[in-house]
Image (cartoon, rainbow, N blue to C red):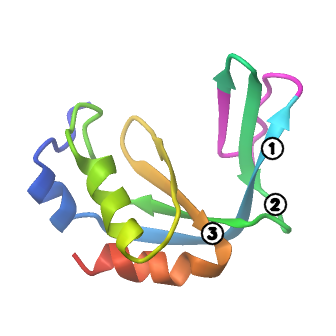
C-alpha cells in the first residue's frame, strides 16, 4: 500500500478535488452501505452514514495525494489551514486518500485554501 509519509511532500501534492454533490451525515439503523453511499462509521452509540443528499449541508473534497495512514501531521496541517479561514471540516481517512467534508456554502473557499499551499 505504501503512501507518502513526508508532511512537506504531502502538502505540496494535495491535489484537492471538489465533488459536485451535497452530502449529509445521518444515523443509520442497519450496517448497510449502499452503492451511492460514501462511508459507514460504527461508533459505540450507533452507526453514522455519510452519503449524497440533495438537501445535504456538506461538500466533499478528496485529496489526490496518496497519503500513508502512518503520515504524521497531515490532518493537523489541514485543520490549521482551514481554521485560518474559519472553515470547519470533518476529515475521513481512507486507505489511499483523505476526504474532507466542509460546509456547502464554504466549499469554494475551502478548495482555494487547500490549493494555496
- Mark 2 or mark 3, earlier in chain: 2
Tell me where the magenta segment starts and ends, as one range.
29-41
- According to the picture, the residue beneath numbered tag 3 turns out to be 103
Magenta span includes 34: yes
Q: Which numbered mark, 2 or 3, is in the foreground of this view?
A: 3
Q: Residue furthest top?
A: 44
Q: CA distance from mark 1 to mark 3?
A: 15 Å
Q: What crowding class fits label 1: few (fewer than 14 Cα within 10 Å), some (14-19), or many (20 or more)?
A: few
Q: Secondary structure at mark 3?
A: strand
Q: Position of residue 58 (x, y in %)?
A: 67, 64
84 in relation to 31, above or below? below
Q: Which residue is denoted by mark 2 in the rendering?
A: 53
Name the residue: 26% across, 49% down: 74
Identify which residue, 75 or 30, lies in the foreground: 75
- Of residue 100 and residue 13, the one placed in the foreground of this image is 100
Q: Is residue 64 visible?
A: no
Whether the residues at callouts 1 and 2 have beta carbons within 8 Å, the answer is: yes
Residue identifier under label 1: 26
Amino acid at each position: 500500500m505504501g503512501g507518502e509519509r513526508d508532511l512537506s511532500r504531502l502538502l505540496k501534492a494535495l491535489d484537492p478535488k471538489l465533488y459536485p454533490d451535497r452530502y449529509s451525515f445521518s444515523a443509520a439503523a442497519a450496517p448497510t452501505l449502499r452503492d451511492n453511499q460514501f462511508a459507514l462509521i460504527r461508533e459505540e452509540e450507533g452507526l453514522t452514514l455519510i452519503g449524497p443528499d440533495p438537501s445535504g449541508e456538506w461538500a466533499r473534497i478528496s485529496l489526490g495525494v496518496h497519503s500513508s495512514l502512518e503520515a504524521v501531521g497531515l490532518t493537523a496541517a489541514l485543520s490549521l489551514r482551514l481554521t485560518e479561514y474559519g472553515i470547519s471540516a470533518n476529515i475521513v481517512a481512507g486507505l489511499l486518500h483523505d476526504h474532507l467534508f466542509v460546509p456547502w456554502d464554504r466549499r469554494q473557499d475551502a478548495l482555494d485554501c487547500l490549493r494555496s499551499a
